[in-house]
Image: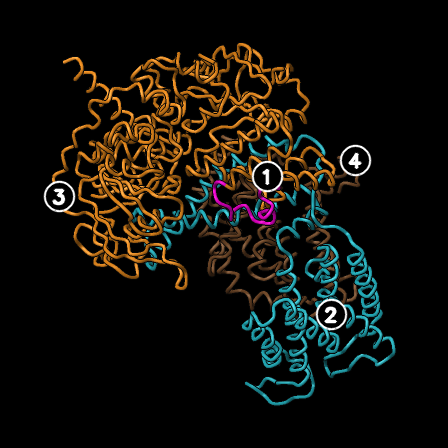
Chain colours: A cyan, B brown, C orange
Amino acid sequence: MRSYAEMNPAAVTVHLMLTACITVFCMEPFLLGISLLCAIGFFLIQNGRKHASFHIGAIGMPTLFALLNPLWNQHGTTVLFFINQRAYTTEALFYGAVAGIRLAAVLYWFRSFSQLMTSEKLFYLFRFLSPKLALIFSMAVRNLTLFRQQMQRIRTAQRGLGLYREGHLIDDLRGGLRIFSILLTWALENGIITANSMAARGYGIGSRSSFTFFRWRRGDIVLLAVSLLLGAAVTAGIAAGRLDWQFYPTCAPAAHSSAYYAVLTAYFLLALLPVIHAYKEAMMWKRLRQDI
Amino acid sequence: MRTIKSEGVRRILRNALPFAVMPAIVLLLPLGLQEQYYALVSFVMVMLALLLFLSGFERRDLGTRRMILVSVMTALSVLGRLLPVIKPITALTVLSALYLGREAGFLVGALSAVLSNFVMGQGPWTPFQMLAWGLIGLFAGILAKPLKRSRLLLYAYGFISGFAYSMLMDIWTTLWTYKEFTLEEYLAAISTAFPLTCLYAVSNVIFLLLLAKPIGDKLERIRIKYGL
Amino acid sequence: METLAARHLTVTFPECEKPVLSDVSFTLESGTFAVICGPTGCGKTTLLRMCKRELTPLCTQSGDILFESQPLGSLDPRVSAGQIGFVMQHPEQQIVTDRVWHELAFGLENLGTDPDVMRRRIAEIASYFGIESLLDRDPAELSGGQKQLLNLASVMIMQPRLLLLDEPTAQLDPIAAADFLTTLHRLNQDFSVTILLAEHRLEEIIPLCDQLLLMAHGTVIMQNDPQTLLTKIHADSPVLAGMPAAVRLWHELHPDCACPLSVNTARTHLMPLMPQQITALPAPPPRPKTDLAIEVSGAFFRYERHGRDILKDLSFSVESGELYCLIGGNGAGKSTVLSALAGINRCYAGDVRIFGKRIQDYKGRSLYQNCVTLLPQDVQTVFLCNTGAEELQEIDKQYSEHLRNFPFDLTPLLTQHPYDLSGGEQQILALAKVMLTQPRMLLLDEPTKGLDAQSKQRLANVLHGLQAQGITTLMVTHDIEFAACHADRCGFLSRGALISADIPQRFFAENAFYTTAASRISRGFYQQTVTVDAIVQIVRKNHEAACH
């Protein structure tokens, strides 16, 4: 009964990165359309009705790109009209729209990814690269929270001394520098305590093991395997040129072969995995409730 | 990196990577590859360079105290990146590199990029930013001696790294918007970003101007106090 | 079996002629709960660090330290790291990672423990310390007391046989400190962990410990069980100032009973021996009335619009030239009162007047110009330069001129980096720095936190000196002993409102729980004796009366 967000971060990362990277490197309007729809679906499952402004921004992107691209892109043959003696073409308009959809889809995927990847999941991922690096990362994340708190304390302290006042430009700049400087000293000087605390608990005496609450369960392995399989299929299809779409000088869609549909379907499944997972979970929950 | 047994080969690889990877991406690939795969391949190359680089740190003995300082400087530059408009991230990366060494410089740059992007927005550009800031730190670490000796050189380095950063990111922009890489489009991207690039470069100099002395003094004192 | 022993240990720091530790010898049997006490600078911290190889400072050393009969230097690194635990003073900075569970796992990871074993140990220790619900939290969100318990837990998870603690409760409020010490005692009783603790909050710990090590001038001059040692200790020994009220009382009066260690034993054994012809001191003369420096009436404040009121119908006043202590528990709103008076927070209702003028009528920075200054709890938020002198110059180039009347000789502090000073010295330097803005009123937030008895006395002298120059001081504090000894008036803050205010003698005599140890000891015997000095005075008066 684990939600997608609770699955093994490595499997989740592989899946999301495959989905997003294929989006980044493929300019096929239908694939991008599928990607955007699935990305929005996934984002809605994660967030419900929150982040309305993000939706407005992301959805506005294709329109904006479509309208603007013809202004500086002179490729294309079907001229709609001229602005300052520069041609405004249908092809450029279309290309802009597709590029906008791609950007919107990528933004959605990465936004969802950022939301899912809490610092402990990132820590888990960094460990694959280098446990030492993972530790530095974890310390940096901790410092970030710590410094924010301390910065607030310093700001209050400096105001209480009457050395700094908010809402006054010069004071803000000078005060900002003071606060930063005080924070820096504080952070560096107190860092030695952390170093001692690490040494006292035996950091660096030999081979380390590392602990994590994340495990590989059947669901995670299935997710990983399915993502890799579908991802490989889509990538192979793209590499074989099945999805090549020509925009300039005239639009020429990819050939509607059975391979073309197969690649699109594979990508659709790949991108829809989180939604399928959520649906499955919901159904299972309902059934369990009914059994009671 | 860990699978390579010989220490000598490892060292050569470690030092050659930054010098080899960047020119390779910029120059060699368009010659040998079909344009449409250029974006994908360069992305993979950047990822690979980063992964190799970062996993190399496992074997390096940074020392506990230097690790702490790296985490402190990273957190500070992430906090700094949340400032409006101008970002001290480059200045902080450069200064960390000068006083804590090239590895530390690379780490501060790369980690600040990925961490701050959790607020600024993660995307396929993240690895490029990580590499760009990482390299700024790395080179500053390599050039530490002259840069520490002459303030003027340091400001120049800040100014140049503003442009270098922008130009590297423009490669990404070009790939991203045009799907293929031609010099013409690259130049167009550079010129579009030019005002912003200038702002970057100038703000780097301003931050170095403001921060070089206080941070330098503090890091130097800590270096002595910690016995680094 | 002995767990820890030192044999003629002498330690000298580089570039120092005098050794920090000279000829230190002591032995701790396994399962002992030992407390080191001694004045600041007597080498407590150095001694503790010498016992933990990983933290040994750079020095030349002669003599031996033995852990379970083995020289410390010859221990396996895993034994040294795992079997000897060390907890330091600062709760915040000892934490390494950004998750509670990971912090617990950290030590075990370093020892290369198997993940399944770690899983079990984390579960065990979390349940023993009652922190299971915190496992997924970021340590930054925890309270100071919880952080320090986490530090203790993440050392205990390695199952050490010896636990060294360097002033672990100095930064905690009294309730969290008592909690921490109780946990220590429980660990000692339940697992027979040998404990060596350096501490200056001795009131609670002395009755619990089995051994006291008395240090002076870099050596252990006495080691014994607390009862015997405190009986033998010289009456003008500087460590006596930090001892429990019962011990100090016994030393002042030398009654015909064993030296009591706790309030309870003092009440049952010592107080009945005291003469009771005179039971009260004459009331102190009332302070001459002066103008009001602070006048707060019906003030309300909250941080968030829909949050709860932090200040709730707060009314109180402070006369100019007074030293006023505001006491109260955690979350009573003490710090918020100060920030409201310093113009950092604005009350949404009620009237706040500083020197008769409404606070909102101080435009711009005029509130801070020769008027009010707030010294925050964490004085490190005030320092930004490399030496004490630069810190002072930063505010005022002619600092030596303007600090001529400062009641403390700052010269030794001026050449050092502020972070190299002791906690007490930092406090005084920060105080000097804020005094350069030439305020008429000082607002102090917990100025005695983490200070030992002598530093507190020194701070009190400075505050009285400033008071003599006409400066009004309002301080908020948890330190009721300090308030009882040095305040002109005390106020009790609870849930954002002032519950009572009076001179300390009456204030603490009327409080039953929130009061000084001396007051609890003498309750029912004498009236309004809230300090050890007051009890001693009454007894002397009784003796004089009996002689006449």
Say yes or no: labels 3 and 4 on the same chain: no
Q: Residue drawn 60% across and 90% down?
A: A81
Q: Is residue C494 left or right of residue B27?
A: left
Tell me how far mark 2 sits from mark 4, CA to CA. Answer: 64 Å
Q: Position of residue A37 (x, y in %)?
A: 69, 75
Q: Which residue is mark 1?
A: B67
Q: Which residue is mark 3?
A: C290
Q: Is residue A124 left or right of residue A83?
A: right
Q: Is residue C93 magenta?
A: no
Residue closer to the observer: A177 or C205? C205
Q: Amino acid at mark 2?
A: Gln
Q: Position of residue B71 (x, y in %)?
A: 56, 44
Q: Amino acid at mark 3?
A: Thr
Element on which disc 4 rests: loop
Chain at numbered mark 4? B
Q: Which residue is mark 2?
A: A290
Q: Would residue B142 be seen by someone viewing this image from the given angle?
A: no
Mark toward the start of the polypeptide (4 vs 1): 4
Q: Which residue is mark 4?
A: B6
Tell me how far mark 3 sits from mark 1, CA to CA. Answer: 58 Å
In front: label 4 or label 1:
1
In front: label 3 or label 1:
3
Q: Are marks 2 and 4 in contact (CB under 8 Å)?
A: no
